[in-house]
Image (tube, helix red, strand yellow):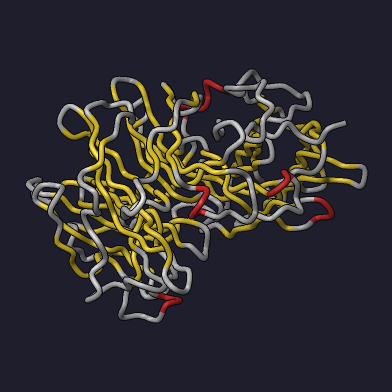
Amino acid sequence: MRYAPPGLCVNDFAVMSDGGRYTVLHLQGPWTDRFDHLHMETSFGRATSTDLVAWETRDTAFGVGLPGRFDQQAVWTMHPFPYGDGLAMFYTGVEGLTAAGWPLQSVGLAFSDRRDGTAWRRHGTGPVVRADPRWYRTGEAMGWRDPFVVRDDEGTGWAMVVCASDASLPLEVSGCVGFATSPDLTHWQVHPPLLSPGDVDELECPVLERTADGWLLFGGVGSAGWFDAWSAPRLEGPWERLGPVAPPGAYAPRVITAPDGARVVLHTAPRRVGLRDSGDLCRGMLAQPKVLSVAPGGPAGAVARLEWWSGLDDWLEEPTDQSVPHAVGDIDITGRTEVVLRRDTGGPALAVHCDEKRVRVTGPGGSVLQATVLARPVRRLRILTVGEYVEVYADGVFVLMTMCYSGHPVTWTATGEGAARSVPVCPVRLPSPHRDDASAIWPGVAG
């Protein structure tokens, strides 16, 4: 349901499928608020699954290059994909630091004769594509990372997008999607930005997804902590902004076909240092899949969103009125409603509130943990709690995500229009219920 390797956290990742088995490669490092990605993100972890929910930790799959090479300092976000009988993988290499301490980034290439994410061999000793100073920053405050590669519109060549910095814009709004093309994966021509909105600091982890009408592009908006979507009939555009796809906290999306054939999105979710509400945000875990849905264009244009994936229903047990730490509950909304999920000695420690279009989650003392305003009044909420994580779905659409470490589970109670009622919940069956390391699902307040 949530995954990180023993004692470590998960940052950016890539997911592959082959013959009923899924493989994740991911950046990994220790739990800490002062995360030094130059020294801690020096290898790719690997995990496998048959259902995208229960993940088994495997060996470390890839690491930094030999001294003196472009990837000697760190290796960051990767994109492996089928190539011939094996895999090709583009990845970010960090050579070192500028005089002011900024990471020098470029993109490298590796191949494998296998499909399981192992046995990588580098293509040469240098990068295959660097930022071009005609369009992109190449020194201080540069960006040239998070490569994602697809076949071009004609299917005869290759196209690469990267997180980059537009040299023509002020730094604070220079986040753009860099663009390069190649006939053979090894020789690349850099072009002006594919997309440069002019109002974001970074567009991290860009992902291209083919649709019946052309392309979807996802990009993580660094300052906002979510990812936006754009659509276009062809790679050269024009690109139309669709807006946020998921609430703050959901980041670094990857798209894959689930066992039931649904096209789903996996993403990362943060944690807090010390696993307590006062802890600083830090890198976290891989969250469970959500269905990718793109509503047809209307007066307001197309809308991309994430919805509840029915494949999770296999991990839900029969409804109960008992207090359980990990659960899913459905609440019909007929007016102003408050659902209490946990209590402390001083009252509600975790509650979800809904007032027509307004939804919020509160913690101890009524502090607002997260809130949103919906486009239309909600008829039903689905609430998921797994450890400290809380997710809220409004009429099936993923609208809120937050964390709360306080309080003890209680029988869920929904109060609306002056009346209180008990809410039956379906306990969530965890894939690894007995794990007790730092990366396990938080079991709740002790005692």
Would residue 63 be visible to someone looking at this image? yes
- Looking at this view, name the residue that lies furthest to the top: 318
Question: Looking at the picture, how far across and down is residue 348, in whole percent?
Answer: 83, 45
Q: Residue at x 75, y 50 (%)?
A: 277
In the picture, the quarter occupied by the C terminus is: top right
Viewer-closest of 242 and 175:
175
Answer with left or right where residue 337 lies relative to residue 243.
right
Question: Looking at the picture, how far across and down is residue 157, in whole percent?
Answer: 10, 49
Question: Looking at the picture, how far across and down is residue 260, in whole percent?
Answer: 36, 25
Answer with left or right where residue 82 lies relative to residue 141.
left
Q: Residue at x 26, y 66 (%)?
A: 131
Answer with left or right where residue 253 lies relative to residue 4.
left
* Residue 385 found in image quarter: top right
In the picture, the quarter occupied by the N terminus is: top right
Taking 376 as reference, is 167 above or below it?
below
Viewer-closest of 188 and 224:
188
Question: Looking at the picture, how far across and down is residue 179, in whole percent?
Answer: 23, 61
